[in-house]
Image: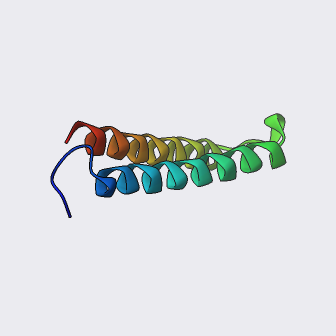
Amino acid sequence: MSSRPDSSWHYAIAFYALIRAHGKLHRLIRFIGRTESFQKSESDNEQILETLDDIESELDSVRRSIDE
């Protein structure tokens, strides 16, 4: 593993994190689409916020790998 920021290892880590974020975003969109707005409960809102936090974490991982 190269420590250079332009190494293929850094690109692979960033790409993998983006794939994970994409998958989580896709699941979130399907979840929101299945749930009618008038039927949303507090637990649904918590799940949505948790998933958004997970996506943000994945994107932060990409930012860190690019900045290294």
Which of the two residues, 46 or 29, is positioned nearer the viewer here?
A: 29
Residue at 45% across, 48% down: 54
Report whether 20 appears left or right of 7. right
Residue 38 figure quarter: top right
Residue 5 location (% of width, % of height):
22, 44
* The C terminus, quarter of image: top left
Residue 27 location (% of width, % of height):
67, 53
| Up-down relation of residue 1 to residue 53 (above or below) | below
Residue at 42% across, 41% down: 59
Tell me the colour scheme of the image. rainbow
Report whether 29 appears left or right of 6. right
Residue at 83% across, 49% down: 34
Report whether 52 appears left or right of 6. right
Residue at 27% across, 51% down: 7
Count of marks, rendered view: 0
Residue 9 location (% of width, % of height):
30, 58
